[in-house]
Amino acid sequence: MNRYFSTIPWLLQRISGAVLVVLLAVHFWVGHYADWGEPITFAGVQMRLQSTVFITIDLILLMLVVFHGLNGVRNIILDYPAFLPHNRPISLILFIIGIATVIFGIYALYPFITGGG
Amino acid sequence: MSLKDSQLKILLRTILNSDEPGTLAYVFHRLTGIILAGYLFLHIWTISSSTISPAAFDMKLGAFSRPLFLVLDVALLAAASFHALNGVRIIFFDTGIGIKRQKLGFILAIVLTVIIALLAAKLLVPVIFGEG
Ligand code: HEM
Ligand code: HEM
């Protein structure tokens, strides 16, 4: 069992969860609960992302939530004994999905930072 | 209505009477975790319309400001709130804090989630029925 479930992912799942409480609360709030009904616009997001603080928050949020979500999915998959022997390919696939998602997420934020177009 | 009431009662009784509310908490936690992970991918895909053009982004996000999606936003907030609160509860127990208060923790997570969702819904009502 220990070969599949080392303590490190377990610990990182808890640390990322604890940090996400704060980041997600901020994200939900500025995301739009601060001014309900105002549509989210490119210009609005661009203005916010002029600030290095918000860029940093977004990037940390992106990386933590992708790790936490996919590591959670891994835990769920490996809960089924049938998948246990395939731990390595499953973990590798999830790892690749995670890296690709983070790269795509940065690519999606890039226009806001450089000014669009 | 009476059917709904009795179902609610059964649910409440299950939570309050079981020695092990852990199973229910576990199911909810897993379910909300999967919902949030699914949302994450849709979310990044939506944001990525920024790479086409600012106008494409505004059009896509404008579509997501319709009342139906605002209601879904509250549901999303509720799922995130429960997952976060219950996650904190799990982390506390793992650190040895409040192990004897697990049921109370679960009830607290549910109650706080309902309060947060109601507050958000209260913000939402004037938006839907106000300017339309
Ligand atoms: C807001 C702060 C959050 C906290 C405090 C938190 C906490 C936790 C904790 C402690 C676990 C481990 C549960 C266990 O081992 O029994 C977990 C699992 C999980 N989380 Fe989160 N989480 C948060 C946000 C998120 C988000 C945003 C997502 C989606 C991207 C997510 C997806 C998952 C998934 C899929 C699992 C696996 C569920 C399972 O094993 O049954 N979580 N979370
Ligand atoms: C209704 C609630 C939400 C709204 C209105 C919202 C809105 C936004 C907006 C406008 C952005 C663009 C960047 C920015 O403004 O800083 C963004 C980015 C992001 N959001 Fe949300 N969000 C919501 C919920 C969530 C949730 C629940 C999660 C986690 C599962 C999440 C994770 C992210 C991530 C990771 C990014 C960065 C995306 C990227 O790098 O491409 N958001 N969100």
Image (cartoon, grey):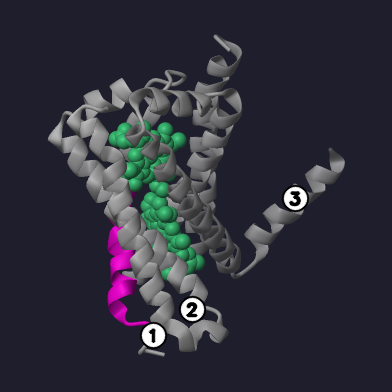
Q: Is A67 located above or below residue B61 in the figure?
A: below
Name the quadrant where ligand 2 sits: top left
Residue matched to label 3: B9
Query: Quick one: SS at disc 2?
Result: helix
Q: Give the number of the disc on residue A4.
A: 1
In the shown orientation, is residue B101 left or right of residue A30? right
The residue tagged with tag 1: helix, strand or loop?
loop
Instruction: Provide the residue span drawn in magenta.
Output: A5-22
Residue type, mark 2 in image: Leu
Query: Does A16 lie within the magenta span?
Result: yes
Image position of A26 (left or right of B35): left
Q: CA distance from mark 1 to mark 2?
A: 8 Å
Task: Report the chain holding disc 1.
Answer: A
Say which mark, if any, is on residue A78: 2
The mark that comes first in sequence, 1 or 2, is 1
Q: Nearer the viewer, mark 1 or mark 3?
A: 1
Residue type indicated by callout 1: Tyr
Of B57 and A3, the residue lying toward us: B57
Residue B100, x across and y down, in percent:
45, 68
Q: Residue at left 21%, top 27%?
A: A115
Q: Are marks 1 and 2 in contact (CB under 8 Å)?
A: yes
Q: In which quarter of the view is residue A75 placed? A: bottom left
Estimate how packed mark 3 is, as few (under 14), some (14 to 19) or many (20 or more) residues with alpha carbons within 10 Å.
few
**Vertical placement of B86 versus A23: above or below?**
below
The dot on residue B65 is none
Do discs 2 and 3 share a chain? no
Depth check: give the residue in front, A64 or A44: A44
Q: Look at the image and say whether residue B99 sits in the magenta stretch.
A: no
